[in-house]
Amino acid sequence: MNSAVLRTEIRLFRREPGSVFWILLFPTLLLVILGSIPSFRQADDDLGGLRTIDAYVPIAVLTGLIVGGLQAMPQTLTGYREQGILRRMAVTPVRPSALLSAHMLVYGAASLASAVFVLAVGRLAYDVSVPEQPFGYALALLLAVLVALALGSVVSALSRTTKIAGAIGSAVFFPSMFCAGVWLPVQAMPDLLARIVGWTPFGAAAQALNRAMAGHWPGWGHLGVLAMWILVLTGAASRWFRWE
Amino acid sequence: MPVIEVTDLHKSYGGRAVVDGVSFGVEEGEIFGILGPNGAGKTTTVECVEGLRVPDAGRVRVAGLDPVADHEKVARVLGAQLQESELQAKLTVREALELYAAFHPRPLDWRPLAERLGLAEKLGSRFGKLSGGQKQRLFIALALVGNPRVVVLDELTTGLDPRARRGTWELIEDVRAGGVTVLLVTHFMEEAQRLCDRIAVIDRGAVVALDTPAGLVRRSAGATVISFTPSAPLDDDEVGALPDLVSVERKDGRITLSGTDGTVNAVITLLARHRITAHQLRVLDATLDDAFLDLTKEKKEKTEGTLT
């Protein structure tokens, strides 16, 4: 890690209003919109007595991670390769891998900040309880961030141009959002579907976050699924990634 | 000992040999040019020197180090300006200079460098908003800001206007005066002639000539061209018998001969003997342009010869 590179990437991130909005603000905005519907603030039997707004806090958290890791990060990274920025960096004593790790750190930190923002607004505006199992929640959240970044890295590894990265990113984006529960929270899914979704990165993340929210340990099964995805995706990304 | 040593370098892409046995050595403090037609393998050769490409065969050393195995050490002593690369569009000129200075242990002060390259008023501008020439000047600055021992410049002045080009040449001469070794890939004969101590002409992946600019010009067939309009007709046989004569051309009463200095002397003697006046007499040295065309053409004819 090179601190000058990291400082530069943080600066550049702040100059991208699109990324700042979609990663940092959109998830909270989503929560605010849902929270403004009165019936969503009442207990729902389909959700096991939770209010819709309660169920959507983890979903909003995951939305930030998915946008950051899957849409924003591969776009920037693929652009850096396409425009020869990585190549230019390769003829300095600092290897282009410094740029890669700075990237992961910036987008990872932005996703986490977005999550904290969602949790804070949920607590303050809609009285959503804070995670009752904070360590389990933090662990599940960290793994979820890593899996989003790993998936984004695979997208970037497979995309020669930013256009392709955009297309592949979108193709993976919608299934990921579905598994996270944007259209139907995991709690409301039929049992079989919930179990299948539990094997996907963001389905497992959603269920781990839900359990930690309710005060249980996130469950080694879900954490294990996340860890497996992180290993597989990171391996695939490092195998297929090309510097130019 | 040469600072840059390239020995029998080979590099192929998809079965096609792009660099096919290139060898040369660049001495400390020298400006060494690589000249050649498009697709001759110039850029691939310097990319092997920069450590961006791994040679298929052959040996490359920069300050005694292998650019692939000792990449980091080589990158500390080598500054490079690449042919096709960009920076982050929203990075400002000042930020880029600060960033690249931070990569090196003993960087130059980038302010005078930016001043020298006419970037002083552009420090706050974002890379994406710069003109082609401004981008090029920034890349030259980035190649030099690390205070390198060796600097590799690929198409140094492409995209620069004549004034900026001349300013850049002066800067490179000053950089060399400070003891820096310069490896320069170029298309511009004027640039090569002005800057380079020695030039390797590369054609089809191989070095076809390696000499000083003056040496290359001397080697080319019609090195000296003499033209005049004689006051009376000249005898064809006598003209044809001139020493070292390469070509004769007659047009509208004007004769153009190419050959050597010896040819010129013989023509003057011949004219004096017949008391013929040479109107509008011009004697021109062939340029590097002529030498270049000659060197790269010769090779082509040979190849065609082997085909038929």
Image: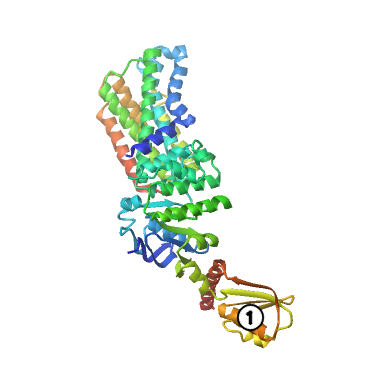
Q: Amino acid at mark 1?
A: Ile
In this rendering, would A227 be left or right of A189?
A: left
The answer to whether residue A142 is above or below residue B11 is above
- State whether residue A210 appears in this view: yes
The answer to whether residue B1 is above or below residue B127 is below
Badge 1: chain ID: B
Quadrant where the N terminus of chain B sits is bottom left
The residue at 42%/63% (across/down) is: B12
Depth order, front residue of B125/A90 = B125
Residue B297 rendering spot, x and y as whole percentages:
55, 71
Quadrant in the picture for residue A120: top left
The residue at 36%/41% (across/down) is: B102
Quadrant in the picture for residue A181: top left
Q: Quick one: label 1, few (<14), some, or many (20+) residues within 10 Å?
A: few
Quadrant where the C terminus of chain B sits is bottom right
Helix, strand or loop under label 1: helix
Residue B289 rendering spot, x and y as whole percentages:
56, 66
Q: Which residue has dot 1 on it? A: B268
The answer to whether residue A219 is above or below residue B151 is above
